[in-house]
């Protein structure tokens, strides 16, 4: 089943306290080299049938009205066929 | 500056009340055709210098220890060069 992904991120001019908290925690955990962190949301929508331009336009309106707050957040919409095949590969393999 | 993206999603077998809330709200807003919604988190990490394999391995350890809960969430790490160029294109253009 095709999957459409909506990424919602705080706009660059908006303060991002969650991202700042992560950024502050990294050195305490021994990590260095990261200069900024922004935290946003990721939505994976499964759609019935083919992903046509009309479907993507629909998803954009969902993102505008429900998934994001356009005043403080920007979003991108893209089709992701690979998600279904490898949902946890990186997460699982990272322990090795 | 290179940007590394960490996507964190609830594992398939884990209940996702936020995603279910979005799924339930869509028909009330007049949207149809979406059969499932999963909500996760997206982190954008700006790193100083080049993104080497060692940096990606570091980011994977950050994802394991700080950004995700490996018991209930899986994550993927990937480099995203395009984010900087077009942070809000889709979100801005969607109103047209």
Image: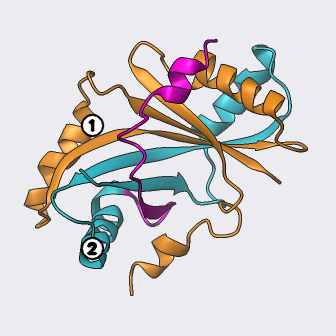
Chain colours: A orange, B cyan
Q: Which residues are magenta?
A: B68-96
Q: What is the number of callouts on the image?
A: 2
Mark 2 is surrounded, within 10 Å at the Cα level, by few (under 14), some (14 to 19) or many (20 or more) other residues, namely few
The residue positioned 47% from the left and 66% from the top of the image is B71
User: Magenta stretch containing residue B82, yes or no?
Assistant: yes
Mark 1 falls within which chain?
A
User: Magenta stretch containing residue B32, yes or no?
Assistant: no
The dot on residue A7 is none
Between tags 1 and 2, which lies in front? 2
Mark 2 falls within which chain?
B
User: Residue beneath label 2, please?
Assistant: B52
Pick whichever, B20 or A90, lies toward us: A90
Mark 1–mark 2 Cα distance, whole angstroms, equals: 26 Å
User: Residue beneath label 1, please?
Assistant: A18
The residue positioned 47% from the left and 62% from the top of the image is B75
Quadrant the C terminus of chain A occupies: bottom left
């Amino acid at each position: 089943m095709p999957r459409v992904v909506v990424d919602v991120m705080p706009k660059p001019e908006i303060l991002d306290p969650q991202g700042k908290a992560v950024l502050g925690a990294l050195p305490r955990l021994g990590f260095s080299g990261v200069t900024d962190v922004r935290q946003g949301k990721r939505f994976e929508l499964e759609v019935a049938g083919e992903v046509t331009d009309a479907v993507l336009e629909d998803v954009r309106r969902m993102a505008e009205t429900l998934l994001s707050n356009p005043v403080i957040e920007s979003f991108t919409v893209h089709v992701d066929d690979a998600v279904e095949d490898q949902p946890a590969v990186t997460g699982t393999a990272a322990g090795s």
